[in-house]
Image (cartoon, helix red, strand yellow):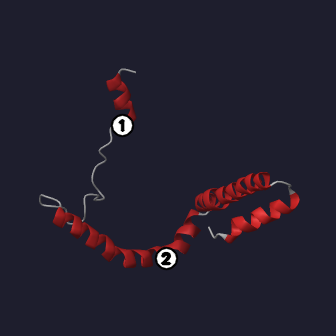
């Protein structure tokens, strides 16, 4: 978040409210609510309601991120394999397609006797 946004909100609240700390607390509450709505809820809601359109719109950007960050990721895995004892992993330890190692919740509850 840019520094001037909370500053402007604080100045706007300070013109309506007397007292520095009261204005500051109100500005913090307002910015928290705005940030939660804009950063937290809106993207998730748009993604769930329009998943195909969001996926198609963001795919080209993600492809370029993958092209740029892919070599960085591979070089970090190579460095980690070089300093880690043992054979190492070509694709890193987090390979996709491996079976999930977490037990099923029903199995865990049965073992615990609940």
- Is 82 displayed left or right of 68 in the figure? left
- Is 14 displayed left or right of 108 in the figure? right
Q: Residue at x 76, y 64 (%)?
A: 9
Q: Where is residue 89 shown, x and y percent of the image?
A: 19, 62
- C-alpha gap between disc 2 and disc 1: 36 Å
Q: Residue at x 70, y 55 (%)?
A: 28
Of discs 2 and 1, which sits in the foreground? 2
Q: Secondary structure at mark 2?
A: helix
- State the residue in front, 36 or 109: 36
Q: Where is residue 50 shown, x and y percent of the image?
A: 61, 63
Which quarter of the rendered picture does the C terminus lie within?
Answer: top left
Q: Residue at x 17, y 60 (%)?
A: 84
Q: Which mark is residue 54?
A: none
Q: Which mark is residue 104?
A: 1
Q: Where is residue 109 shown, x and y percent of the image?
A: 38, 27
Residue 38's image quarter? bottom right
Q: How many numbered circles are shown? A: 2
Label 2 or label 1, whichever comes before in sequence order: 2
- State the residue in front, 50 or 101: 101
- Mark 1 Cα within 10 Å, few/some/many (few <14, many 20+)? few
Residue linked to disc 2:
61
* Residue that sits furthest to the top in the current view: 113
Please say if the residues under marks 2 and 1 sit with CB atoms less than 8 Å apart: no
């Amino acid at each position: 978040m840019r520094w001037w946004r909370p500053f402007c909100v604080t100045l706007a609240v300070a013109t309506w409210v007397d007292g520095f700390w009261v204005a500051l607390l109100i500005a913090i509450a307002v910015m928290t609510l705005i940030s939660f709505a804009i950063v937290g809820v809106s993207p998730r809601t748009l993604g769930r309601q329009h998943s195909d359109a969001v996926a198609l719109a963001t795919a080209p950007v993600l492809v370029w991120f993958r092209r740029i960050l892919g070599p960085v990721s591979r070089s970090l895995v190579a460095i980690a394999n070089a300093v880690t004892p043992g054979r190492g992993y070509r694709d890193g330890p987090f390979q996709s397609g491996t079976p999930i190692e977490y037990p099923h919740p029903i199995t865990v509850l049965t073992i615990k006797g609940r």
